[in-house]
Amino acid sequence: MPSRVYKIIELVGTSETSWEDAAKNAVELAAQSLTDLRVVEVNKLDMVIEDGKVASYRARINVSFKYEAKEALDR
């Protein structure tokens, strides 16, 4: 089996409905520009409060994806 390298980035997704949707939004947007996404770790969940009510949910996640040598030149 050839060796592989994975890069990990941190993202914060938001949603007006749930933490699950916030994490999903971050993954789906990342998938538009990154290839071969592998694993997501949810690190932190929080909410934005406005006028005493929950205005939005935020999920801070780490996303790993396969790192290709050509990416080093593109970034």
Image (cartoon, rainbow, N blue to C red):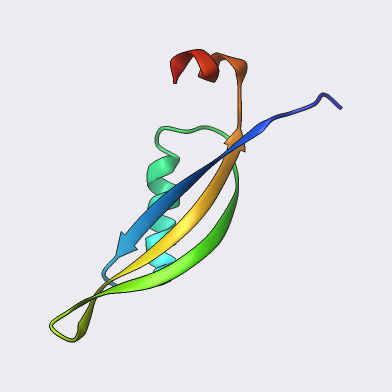
- State left or right for residue 69 relative to residue 74: right
Toward the viewer: 40 or 24? Answer: 40
The residue lying furthest to the left in this view is: 51
- State left or right for residue 71 relative to residue 66: left
Residue at image position (12%, 83%) is 51
Residue at image position (36%, 56%) is 13
- Residue 72 in percent (x, y) is at 53, 18
Q: Quadrant of the N terminus?
A: top right
- Residue 41 in percent (x, y) is at 58, 57
Q: Is residue 36 above or below residue 15?
A: above
The residue lying furthest to the right in this view is: 1
- State left or right for residue 50 relative to residue 8: left
The residue lying furthest to the bottom in this view is: 52
Splitting the image into 4 quarters, where does residue 23 fall? bottom left
- Residue 31 in percent (x, y) is at 45, 40
Q: Is residue 35 above or below residue 49?
A: above
Residue at image position (36%, 65%) is 58
Toward the viewer: 61 or 33? Answer: 61
Query: Is residue 18 at all visible to an observer of this figure?
Result: no
- Residue 62 in percent (x, y) is at 53, 51
Toward the viewer: 60 or 21? Answer: 60
Q: Is residue 59 above or below residue 53?
A: above
How many numbered marks, from 0 up? Answer: 0
- State left or right for residue 5 relative to residue 52: right
Query: Is residue 27 at all visible to an observer of this figure?
Result: yes
Residue at image position (52%, 32%) is 35
